[in-house]
Image (cartoon, grey):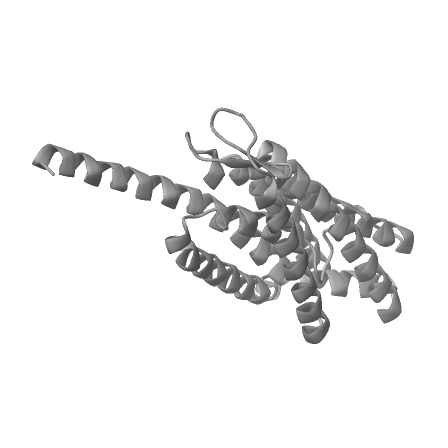
Amino acid sequence: MDLIAFEEMKLSQGSFESLAWRRQASLFATDGMRSFAQGYFSITYVVIARNHGISALGLGVIAGISTAVGIGITHFLAQLAYRLGARTSLVLSGLLMAATGTAVALAHSTGAFYACALLGFLPPSGGMFVGALVEGVLAQAPPKRRTIVFARNGLVVTVMGAAGALFASFPTVVGMSQADGLSFLVWLYAGLGFALAGVSFSVIDFGARHGEPRFSGNAVVGSTGRKSSGSSGGRSDSAIRRLSFLFVLDSAGSGV
């Protein structure tokens, strides 16, 4: 290999690494933002609901409704991501999060709180489809880099979630009353939803590069737009079902 070819190869690899990092950064930001918001909102929401007279049983019912709706939304957004890419689905997720924060902030009756659950973003599993979409895109990373990409995302999500839980005490630290503090946190949650939607516009699907396949339904579509075998989609769906069952067991055991 001559020197010029070697330098071109190094430049190509550098460009690929730069593009790969930009893809990861936007995905890490969306999942991290969601984790931070859920970290404090899962605490804040319970306090608000109890202040409005919702019992422990009522909170359980609301959580069940939100989880059931979230499962349906996850399926819908996953199908949308297959056809239009994860960017569109993540933007919609951010808008749902913003709508949830706004609805909770304006809710003044028990019925209104139950209605908020229909958006699928309430704790304890609120926004689970954001994480599912991000992981779906990260799974398209090159096999040799997939483990480190998932490890980075897991670190970001864990740290941001912990930071969010700590942030729940911020209004008290700065001397806000409980009412003002709760209102601030809920409206911030809505604002973070809009921010998540905004950041999602910068998301680049791993399969969206020129010459690489992208998923469309149960088939793989190449850069020419022609469909190839649908066996990959079938295997993917099977893996998603097995992972979903694993997550159900994990959530049942941990209570979250």
Q: Which residue occupies the foreground of this view, 173 or 243?
A: 243
Q: Which residue occupies the foreground of this view, 52 or 249?
A: 249
Q: Which residue occupies the foreground of this view, 196 or 230?
A: 230
Q: Is residue 107 left or right of residue 79?
A: right
What residue appears at the point 62 percent right and 61 percent down from the top-left corner? 40
Q: Farthest top residue? A: 224
Q: Is residue 208 left or right of residue 240?
A: left
Q: Is residue 4 left or right of residue 203?
A: left
The quadrant of the rendering that contains the N terminus is top left
What count of labels does the image hold? 0
Q: Is residue 252 left or right of residue 91?
A: right
Residue 65 in view: yes
What residue appears at the point 54 percent right and 52 percent down from the top-left corner? 135
Place of residue 32 in the rendered image (x, y in percent of width and height, measured from the top left): 52, 54
Place of residue 97 in the rendered image (x, y in percent of width and height, measured from the top left): 68, 46
Name which quarter of the figure residue 56 lies in.
bottom right
Depicted 226 relative to depicted 101: above or below: above
Place of residue 207 in the rendered image (x, y in percent of width and height, measured from the top left): 48, 38
Place of residue 234 in the rendered image (x, y in percent of width and height, measured from the top left): 63, 47
Q: Which residue occupies the foreground of this view, 170 or 151?
A: 151
The quadrant of the rendering that contains the C terminus is bottom right
Residue 177 in view: no
Q: Farthest left residue? A: 3
What residue appears at the point 70 percent right and 43 percent down from the top-left corner? 96
